[in-house]
Image (cartoon, grey):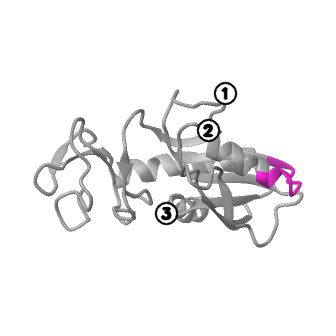
Amino acid sequence: MAGAVTDGPPGDPFELVASRQQLAEGVGRMAEAIESDHPDGVTLVAVLKGASVLVADLSRLLRVPVHIEFLAIAPFDGTARRTRVVRDVEGGVAGADVVLVTGTFDTGLTADFVRRHLESAGPRSIRVATLVDRGATGLLPATPDYRVLTVADRFVVGYGLDHQGRHRNLPDLWAFAPGAPMAPGAAPKGDGRLSP
């Protein structure tokens, strides 16, 4: 049903990018690939808040030993002039095989920053998993090792991703329809459980 358009509040159409079923299938494929690459276990480091739903679903599907850590960053906003860690991993990652779990992989700058931060703690390996890979928009010559789907040049919400702090709870992934203004507080029409 990807590509279907539904009307949100007046003037704010949303387009379904991936249903909850499609997301579940993609996360299942990601779990299989991570298991194959890490048969002895893995440490998942989720970047808050966008990766929260993905890491929860992913961790439940993995059949290898899993350790979960969380990390939060303050993204570059023009005023601080740099990205910084505001919540670091608590248990450490020294000697661990780490999979950094992100909500989106866009320019590659955030993943590169977090990777370098984690490397200073001495993990055995670091790979990157993302819900949404934005494709070839990266400023760095880097791509995620694992992705659920690729969505180029679209702003998406749902399944942990937000717009102005809202819509993380939507079980499907939605994009603002092309050319539609993103009004504050806009939401897909319905009760938040939009697909069958």
Secondary-structure class at tag 1:
loop
First in sequence: mark 2 vs mark 3: 3
Q: CA distance from mark 2 to mark 3?
A: 21 Å
Secondary-structure class at tag 2:
loop
Q: Residue furthest left?
A: 10
**What residue is shown with label 1?**
141
Quadrant of image for the C terminus: bottom left
The image quadrant of residue 67 is bottom right
Amino acid type at circle 3 is Val
Q: How many marks?
A: 3
The residue sitting at 54% across, 52% down in the picture is: 77
**Callouts 2 and 3 close, C-beta under 8 Å:** no
Depicted 147 relative to depicted 56: above or below: above
Name the foreground residue: 143 vs 34: 143
How crowded pointer 2 is (Cα within 10 Å; few <14, some 14-19, many 20+) is rated as: some
Amino acid type at circle 1 is Pro
Q: CA distance from mark 1 to mark 2?
A: 8 Å
Q: CA distance from mark 1 to mark 3?
A: 27 Å
- Which disc, if any, is residue 108? 2
**Callouts 1 and 2 close, C-beta under 8 Å:** yes
The residue sitting at 58% across, 54% down in the picture is: 75
Residue 127's spot in the image, x, y percent? Answer: 72, 45
Amino acid type at circle 2 is Gly
Q: Which residues are magenta?
A: 117-125
The residue sitting at 65% across, 45% down in the picture is: 111
How crowded pointer 1 is (Cα within 10 Å; few <14, some 14-19, many 20+) is rated as: few
Quadrant of image for the N terminus: top left
**What residue is shown with label 3?**
53
**Callouts 1 and 3 close, C-beta under 8 Å:** no
The answer, for residue 33, to whether it is visible in the render is: no
The residue sitting at 61% across, 38% down in the picture is: 108
